[in-house]
Amino acid sequence: MILWLTIIGMGIITYAIRLSLLGLWEQVELTAVTHRALKFVPIAVLSAIIVPEMVLPGGTLDLSLGNGRLIAGLIAIAVAWKSKNALWPVAIGMIVLWLLP
């Protein structure tokens, strides 16, 4: 019972924090510089998650052509840049990763 009360309590706290920030968001006027900076948040977060997995497989730096994750990731980046699509880089990157030894 304690576990369920903890989970529910943390859910309520998380919801309250997010709701309070949304309420404040309407009252805050953002500058043009802030709007431009916020456009880069998704790519920065995604890069912070993906790049370490590409260059540090198994916790060791590997920038060689034998690193399948790095090759598949670079190909997926090129596909994303050319196609401007969210689905194609994922599909092509996964196919390349599966095909590489």
Image (cartoon, grey):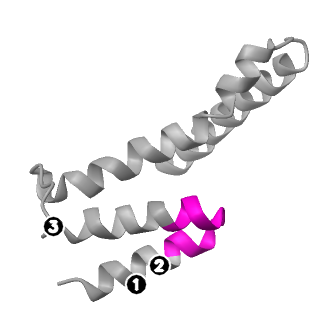
- Residue 49: where, in percent of width, then height? 40, 47
Q: Amino acid at mark 1?
A: Ile
In the rendered structure, which segment of residues is drawn in magenta?
Answer: 79-90
- 18 over 71 or under it: above or below: above
Residue sticking out furthest to the left: 60
Q: Nearer the viewer, residue 85 or 54?
A: 85
- 94 over 25 or under it: above or below: below
Would residue 31 be found to the left or right of residue 52 on screen? Answer: right
Q: Determine if the magenta segment contains residue 82.
A: yes
The residue carrying mark 3 is 65
Reading the chain from its start, which is encountered first: label 2 or label 3?
3
Q: Amino acid at mark 2?
A: Ile
- Residue 48: where, in percent of width, then height? 40, 41
The residue carrying mark 2 is 92
- Residue 8: where, in percent of width, then height? 62, 45
Within 10 Å of the Cα at label 1, are there few (<14), some (14-19), or many (20+) other Cα atoms? few
Q: Main secondary structure of the magenta part?
A: helix
Where is residue 17, by image quadrant? top right
- The C terminus appears in which quarter of the rendering? bottom left
- 19 over 81 or under it: above or below: above
